[in-house]
Structures are given as structure tokens and as C-alpha cells.
Amino acid sequence: MQTLRQIRVPALVALALLAYVAAAPAQLNTKANIAVTKHNLSASGPETTKATAEDQICVFCHTPHAANTSAPAPLWNRKLSSATYTPYTSNSLDTERILGALSQPGGSSKLCLSCHDGTMALGTVGVLDGRSDPAAVAGLTGTMPAGAGATSGFTRNLGIDLRNDHPISFRFDTPLATSDGELRDPPYSAGGKTVVGQRSSAVRPMLPLDHEGKVQCTSCHDPHLEASKFLRLNRLQKNAAPGTTFNPSNDQICLGCHNKLGASWSNSAHASSTVADETYTLDAATRREFPTGTKAWEAACLNCHDTHAVQGSRRLLREGVAGSSDGTTSGSFSGGFSGEPAGSSAIEETCYQCHQGGASKVIDVGNGSVPNIKSEFARTRRMPITTSEQGNGLATTERHDISDANFIETPDKLGLGNHATRHAECTDCHNPHRVIRNSLFTGQPGDANSNSRTHTAGGTSGLKGADGNVASGVLRGAWGVEPTYGIVTSWPQVPTYTVKSGDPGTNPSTARTQPYLTREYQLCFKCHSDYSGTAGGNMPALGYTGGTPAGTMGLNRYTNVAAEFAVNATDPPTSGRDQGELGNGTTFEPSDTNHRSWHPVMMPTGRTPQERTNSTTVGAFSNIRAPFNTHDNVGYQTMHCSDCHGANATGLSEPTVQGPHGSNNDFLLKGVWSNAVKPNTVDATNSDNSICGRCHNPANTAGGFRNGDASHSFSSKQASSCTSCHIAIPHGWKNKAFLVNLACVQREGGAGYSDACTNVSGTTRVTIEPYYYRAILRIKTWSRSTAWQIGSCGSSGSDSENWMSSTCENGGS
């Protein structure tokens, strides 16, 4: 039988406590039983941190007499910390946009912080055995234990820097929910019960706001519960989330307030039970206090976030810092990059927990592989994902700073007018709350096939390849920009931009007119254009650590890629022939047989096999390789930026991991692009690993040439680099077939440039950044496809192949 001293809480205190904890019912499988929890700091407590002799349980927080009147009820028996806190802050925190920066913690949160900020001894109570202001309770002279390390994320000694802790003491109401777009609108009810809202005499929310409608520590935690982390509702997802209304017996507590657009989250690759079925390793599960065998879909939000995250991380990202963050010397949960200051924000480390190889990975193999992305960023050329590589090597802090649930950043944050802010983070290209495992963002999210993680090269046969540029499932819900050109009268023509953002929802359309992102190029153009770069020749410079060195292929700066793709074309083609003929303006070459050219990233070209060969015979056009060589698709199909840019491969093989994360080739290309690439080496197997040879096979003579005349098989052209005749950056060009033309070099290069290869005695090859690199080609007569002859090229007085003679090919700079 328990004695009165063992209980030591009179009935009036017990009633007060019951009224306090009745803010929400306990979890269905838990009960209020503080005696068996870590909050029992008496000698009978279950943990090592406890009093040595004191047997009272409630006295560490409550007293029936002489309570702290400055503290919120109930009958508080501790002083409140006088610490000045650094509150949570984020550019995407809507309450800051509405009310300004968060104020100091208040309300019941101050009660929790009197222990959990680590500034006062746990045994510091106001009244003990009738004595006011006694000395600390025996054996509890220390502050909250540091656990694995006060800054590790595996501790509940929160300190006074709360930037890595869930925001508290802010008002949660309709204006906030409306502004955010992914929050429940309080009071929110499900199944006839109030999930989140303010308490009243008739309402007991499961997740209670305080009397001012503010979120406090006690909105999620009840310190008396026999429950994991004292949470009022489930810490983990119990069954596959249907993505509809909140189910308190099934759903993770986070979803009680954060709806994350319902099915968009529950169907995502990080929440779907058929996709995120990998099991946590024993070491990782133990560290995170997950039950053995916990799967990624069950951890759900906790895969990436922790409400009390590692010090230095932003947006509550688990392990989101450089260097070791787990309180050990091994760095097994956050290896970081050498040279990065430990404890500084590094978003990619959160993703690398799963998206890496080796022993540091926190999950085991499931149904379908998780791509190893970390190794891609260790390649010779890579996106600037580390802080030291951002801002063209000038950044000292992480530059990525989203503003809303769509992960949008303003152009200045991406580098407009200030190249020192340029960066690349995982969430620049992926929205982890919306991504699905499918080759199309419109596909089914439960596809566990590891080969369906990215796009379908060449598009589908049913649409004649016109969907070859539709965004893939891993880009679902990301944001980008759609360029609009108007009438193309110059080149490159700087477009205007429309932001594409938001969640596609169910049964989404792939039309470019949709408000959300539907094309991969829309994602790429938000950085690779004057939308966030700077037009007028002041695009960001090459040469940051890990990037392509300045001077490569005659280039010193990035180009305005969106402007290079400027076209007046339709999808599908409507001109009945090469759509480049629609792009002519008065400033282009003065011939109706010369016209715009582009790779079909934005729009198809209309250059069908018949247009190229003047033949309807299947196979007559044979200088394009699979998967772009389907006869009926040629001229109608489109392609992705990542068909050319991504991890380097060998010959005609495809890399295991798709996307332009990193490559051992310059410009993040899948193959080699240099002036050493020559047509005679781009053979059937692409043995020189040429980027052009991955799709083109000039060993086949049938193409836009007149067979047997001006094909690539002629010896002079076989010995010449591709850039002798074609521009160095083949996104789009003012001339057909990306052909350079020294006959108009003064107009293109400005004063001071001249054509030194007018005849066979010329000795100079021309380099004009960014499109001419050691070029020698002159066009004498622009001809249509199938009518191009050797006499179409060269100086006005030359014949045969003299314009490709060795004196011009090998001489000069």
C-alpha cells in the first residue's frame, strides 16, 4: 500500500492536474502513468537521472501550497528560466510573414523549458516538505543531461537556441492556415472529434492550443503520458495513410496539423507503403528510438525531420548539417564533406541518410532500390551543392532559402544581380513531399520498379514521342518557369517568364498552360536563364570548385539557355515541314532555305524522315540512334535536358542514376564534348564516348545530306572536329543544323573579327565565345535537306573540299 508521503499530492492538486491533462485524450494504447516515465525524477524513477532519496513524484513540478504565481497553472513548483532564447526562424514560416519574427516562448512552454533549456538544475523546486526555496533535491544538482551531445539532435537538452526546434508560442488560426496552404484550419475535426483547436468547457481537442489559440509544447506532449516522447498521438504512421481526413488512431501526429495536401503526401515516394518499404537498420532505429523493423513509410515525416533537430540544421531537418552530427566520432549519420564546418547547415546531408551507399546508410534494401545520389556529387564535375561551392565559390553560408510550401525562391535568391547567391540544393529540383516513383509525374505513385524513377527517353509511342519532355515523377510538384518568346526576330531572343508551381493534384494534365510544372526544361530554366542569371553577357562565370573550368571549349561564362531555345513552333508540328522555317526574321541569314535549328527540348522540330531524306521508306533516315530513331516519331518527338546532362556513361550505355547531379565530363554531360571529337570516331558503338554520338551516328550517310556527296564520310570532314562546322553549344542556333558560318562572322562577332579562311591560303580558325570554337566553315549556298552538296560550302571562289584543307584545319589559334 502506498503511503501518503509516497503520493504527497492532496486531492485538490490531483484534481487540478486532471483538469490540466484533460486537454486531450491519451493515445488509444497509452495512459497517464507518470510513475513509469522519465518524468518520474524520484528515487523510484526508471532512469539513471533521478533523486537519490526523495520519494515524492509530483513535487518536482507541482505543489499544493506556495506555488509559483507567475507561472501558468497548475500549481507550479519551479522557477521559470530567465534565459533569453533565439526563437525558430525561417523564410518559409508563414507566421513570420503575418506577425513578424517569433517572440520569446511563453505560456506552458515556459514550464517545460524550466528543465529542458538546461539552464537550471532539475532539483531546483520552490517548495519541499513545507520549506520554501529549499536547496536542490538530493541527487539532482545537475541540469538536463546532454545525451549523445547537446547539439547532436539526440538529446532533449534543448539549450536556449531554439532555431532547430519546432516553433512554439505562435497563434495557429485561419489566416495562418490559409497563408501556408498545407495546414489544417483550426478548429479541425475528424470523426466527430476535435483534432486541433482551443479548449473550452465542451471541447477537449486531441492537440490543444492554449487559451490564446497558440501552439505550445503541450499541444503535442503530455508530460504524464506513458507514451513515446510523451506524445498525445502516434509518433509513427500505423497503416498506409489514405490521404483524406486525419485518423487519430492510425496517422502520425504531425498530420494532425500539417495536411501536406492529403494524397499528395500519402502517395509520395517517402510515404507510400508500396514504395518506401525499406526497413531501418538496427543501429539507426536504436539511435532514433524507433521500434526494431520500422519501415521508411512508417517513419514518414521523421525520415527527414525531427521536432528537436541537430543544432545548425534548418527547417527541422534531421542530420541536416555538415560534419558529424550524431555525437560520435564516426560521423555515421552525417559524414559531411571535407572542408565544410561541422554544425553548419547542409540540406543534402538529410537526403544522404538514405540516398547513399555503404555502411552509413540508415535503411536496408526494400522493393526497388534507392538511388545513391551522394556518390554523384563526388564526381569531378557537379552541381554546387556544398556551401563552399555555392555562390561561384564565394559563399560562406548555405544560400538556399525557400519562401513557401512550393519551395519557391525569388530570382535574387537564385543569383539575379548577385552571382554569389547561386546554389544547387536537393530541394531546388525535388519537392520531397510530392515526388513519386514513376517515369511521368502523371503516373501511378506505387510503381516499385527501380527503373521507373526517371523519365522515358524519347517519350511514348502512343504520343509519337511528343511527351519526351514531360516532367518525371521525381520532379512532381517542383517549380520552374515557362519562357514566352513572341515573334522571334533576333537570336538569342530573351524571353519573358511565367512561374510554374504548385501540386498537380489527381489526374493532372501535362499541358504547358497548367499553373504547375509539367516539363523538365521549366525546372532547368529557372537557373539557366536570365530569370535568375543576368542577361547582356553577364551570366555567371565558369570555374567554381567542382564546376567546369573557365576556358573550356572557349567558354568563360554560362549562357542564357532559355534564350537559345527561342522558337516559333507548335507541339505537335503544324507547318507540314521543318518548323525552323517559321523562325526566320529579317536579321537572320538572307535565304529562305536557311532557318532556325534546335534540339527538341521545348518543341519538336518537324524534321520528319521525309523532310530529311525526301523518302517515305522506313529506314531511309538512319543517322539517329535509339530511342530517338522510331520512324513515325522523328520530327514529332521531344527530349529532356537530362538526356544529355547527367552522370557520365560508357559508349551507348545509360548511367544508373539519372539527372544532372554530377559527371566526370565537363558541363555535366553524359559524354565527352571537345574539339577532339570527330565524326570518324562517332561510330556504331560510340567508342570515343562522344556526347553527340550517343544519339547521332554519322557513320551512316543517310540524313540531311545528299547521299554520296556531302556526307560525313568524306575524309577531310572525318579528320575535323565537330566544332569546325557546328556551334559549340548545340541548344539552338540561328542557322540550320547548328552550322557556323564565317561569312557572317563580323555581324556575329562584332568589329575586329574577320574571316581568315576565305580561301585555301587561310591559316586562322575562329573562336568567338560562346558559339564559335575553332570554327572554319563558310556557307556559300544554303540548301534544303537532301539538296546539300559539297559545293554549298566554302568561299565564293573555292571548289570541292578546299575549304577543309589542312592549312585551314590545323593552322592558327
Image (tube, helix red, strand yellow):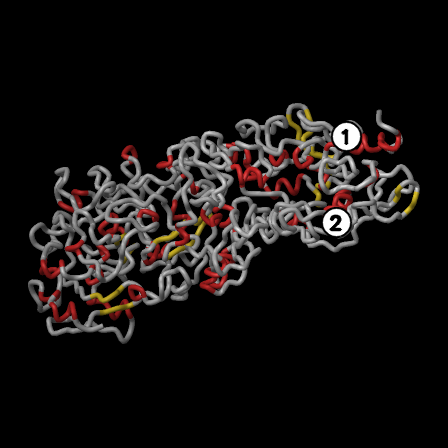
- Which mark is first along the chain, 2 or 1? 1
Around disc 1, counting alpha carbons within 10 Å, would you say few (fewer than 14), some (14 to 19), or many (20 or more)? some
- Callout 1, which amino acid? Ala
Question: Residue 716: image x %, image y %?
Answer: 11, 61
Report whether 257 appears left or right of 443: right
Quadrant hosting residue 241 = top right
Question: Residue 221: image x %, image y %?
Answer: 70, 37
Report whether 94 appears left or right of 781: right
Indicate the quadrant containing the C terminus: top left, top right, bottom left or bottom right: bottom left
Question: Residue 365: image x %, image y %?
Answer: 43, 35
The one of 129 and 573 positioned closer to us in this rendering? 129
Report whether 429 appears left or right of 594: right
- Callout 2, which amino acid? Thr
Can the viewer see residue 187 in this picture? Answer: no
For residue 743, above or below residue 168: below
Residue that numbered label 2 is attached to: 143
User: How many badges with numbers are in the image?
Assistant: 2
Q: How far apart, in angstroms, are the residues tagged by discs 1 and 2?
A: 29 Å
Can the viewer see residue 722 in this picture? Answer: yes
Numbered tag placed on residue 742 in the rendering: none
Q: Residue at x 53, y 63 (%)?
A: 396
Residue that numbered label 1 is attached to: 22
Q: Residue at x 26, y 54 (%)?
A: 596
Question: Residue 33: image x %, image y %?
Answer: 75, 30
Tag 1's secondary structure? loop
The one of 8 and 257 positioned closer to us in this rendering? 8
Around disc 2, counting alpha carbons within 10 Å, would you say few (fewer than 14), some (14 to 19), or many (20 or more)? some
Q: Of discs 1 and 2, which sits in the foreground?
A: 2
In the picture as drawn, the residue positioned furthest to the bottom comes out as 752
Tag 2's secondary structure? loop
In the picture as drawn, the residue positioned furthest to the front comes out as 52
Indicate the quadrant containing the N terminus: top left, top right, bottom left or bottom right: top right
